[in-house]
Image (cartoon, rainbow, N blue to C red):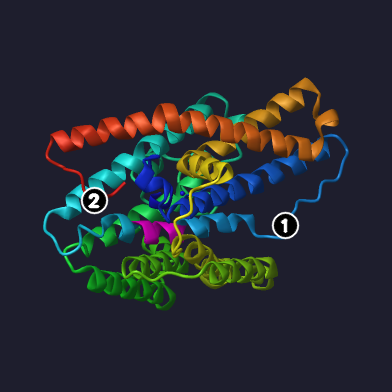
């Protein structure tokens, strides 16, 4: 969740008419799709307790919301950093502002998860970790868990481990002109993936060579097209949306055994088409009320991604103990969970994310890390 989850905006007249309104709405949909997937998973267990059979709605791969985030991340980094390319001194400012945006909320939810693991481990479905693994989780360093998965203490942080790796690579090319930087970084991502396919690497190197990082390259390319002034007609954008949804509905990964190898093709390319449709608009229409709400939800998408497991699991526990699960039913639980997730995430964004990020960035500016245009 990430630069894709780290782009902030305000409702000034200039920004309200921005083409990136649709990118914000897409971020909202991507975050909610992941929450919907996990709510359905808990609904299955809820239905089993009441003797019902719940069939999840799996016409679309809801986890592909993560792939949309990765493509948006590559796009936003180019868009927001375009004034930094080819200059000196931008690397430190870029990385400092990225950490200021990503780390506080992630460290907070990781700490909450750690406290739950220590106080009430029965509420969690995970094995205890060694101290060094807990520290690695806070430092965005991938490691292999006892069950063989490569995930941090708070499992959703696996996406942020990729994001931070991408940020480091991105910072390394900032001294180059934009076109050369995008081209070199795209080539580097391809070569890193190839190295991982040709050489048996230990962790965390194997993690960082996963083909999913190619989705950042998709976003980089779209960012370059945007900066170059490329736009798409309304009809073309809707065609891209239709093609993307059709490709996702085919569920190509379901026909293959190796999720990692197929993911950039089966989910990454459709995600890139959706981001292209959202970003490469040539109209400046005033946003509708629905669009404004979508943008507000997009602002809170990072919080939605990180907070939703706590909300969904909490709602499930309350429902089970209150005995209203037989009345509410699986779909009632899902709708209640998503509504509560949205409400809690908006509050977290408004009263934690924004003030904490603003405070840290104010300190960075005071210490000489001036505004870089990167949000």
At 59% from the left and 46% from the top, the residue drawn is 32
**Residue 262 horizontal/vertical position (percent):** 56, 72
Task: Give the crowd class for mark 1: few <14, some 14-19, many >=20 residues within 10 Å.
Answer: few
Of 173 and 47, which appears nearest the observer? 173
Q: Which residues are magenta?
A: 70-76
At 41% from the left and 78% from the top, the residue drawn is 198
Q: CA distance from mark 2 to mark 1?
A: 39 Å
Task: Give the crowd class for mark 2: few <14, some 14-19, many >=20 residues within 10 Å.
Answer: many
Outermost residue, top side? 322
Give the residue number, with chain letter if any, for mark 1.
58
Give the residue number, with chain letter if any, for mark 2.
94
At 66% from the left and 35% from the top, the residue drawn is 337
**Residue 253 horizontal/vertical position (percent):** 63, 69
Q: Quadrant of residue 288?
A: top right
What secondary structure characterizes most of the magenta part?
helix
Q: Is residue 142 visible?
A: no
Instruction: Name which of mark 2 and mark 1 comes first in the sequence.
Output: 1
């Amino acid at each position: 969740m990430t630069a894709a989850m780290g782009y902030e905006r305000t409702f000034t007249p200039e920004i309200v008419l921005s083409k990136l309104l649709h990118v914000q709405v897409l971020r909202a949909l991507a975050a909610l799709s992941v929450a919907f997937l996990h709510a359905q998973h808990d609904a299955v267990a809820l239905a089993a307790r009441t003797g019902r059979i719940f069939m999840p709605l799996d016409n679309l791969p809801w986890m592909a919301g993560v792939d949309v985030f990765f493509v948006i991340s590559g796009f936003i980094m180019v868009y927001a950093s375009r004034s930094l390319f080819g200059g000196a001194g931008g690397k430190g400012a870029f990385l400092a502002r990225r950490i200021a945006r990503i780390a506080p909320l992630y460290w907070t939810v990781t700490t909450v998860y750690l406290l739950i693991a220590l106080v009430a481990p029965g509420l969690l479905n995970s094995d205890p970790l060694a101290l060094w693994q807990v520290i690695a989780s806070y430092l965005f360093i991938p490691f292999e868990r006892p069950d063989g998965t490569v995930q941090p203490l708070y499992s959703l942080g696996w996406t942020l481990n990729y994001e931070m790796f991408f940020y480091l690579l991105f910072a390394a090319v900032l001294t180059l002109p934009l076109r050369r930087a995008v081209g070199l970084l795209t080539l580097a991502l391809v070569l890193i993936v190839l190295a991982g396919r040709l050489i048996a690497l230990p962790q965390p190197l194997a993690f960082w060579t996963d083909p999913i990082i190619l989705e950042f390259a998709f976003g980089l390319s779209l960012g370059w097209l945007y900066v170059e002034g490329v736009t798409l007609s309304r009809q073309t954008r809707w065609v891209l949306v239709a093609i993307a949804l059709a490709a996702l509905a085919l569920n190509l990964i379901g026909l293959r055994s190796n999720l990692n190898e197929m993911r950039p093709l089966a989910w990454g390319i459709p995600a890139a088409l959706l981001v292209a449709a959202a970003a490469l608009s040539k109209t400046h229409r005033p946003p509708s009320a629905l669009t404004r709400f979508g943008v507000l939800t997009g602002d809170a998408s990072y919080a939605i991604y990180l907070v939703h497991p706590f909300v969904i699991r909490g709602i499930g526990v309350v429902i089970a103990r209150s005995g209203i699960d037989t009345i509410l039913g699986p779909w009632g639980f899902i709708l209640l969970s998503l509504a509560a997730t949205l409400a809690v995430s908006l509050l977290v964004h408004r009263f934690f994310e924004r003030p904490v990020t603003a405070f840290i960035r104010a300190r960075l500016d005071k210490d000489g890390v001036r505004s870089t245009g990167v949000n």
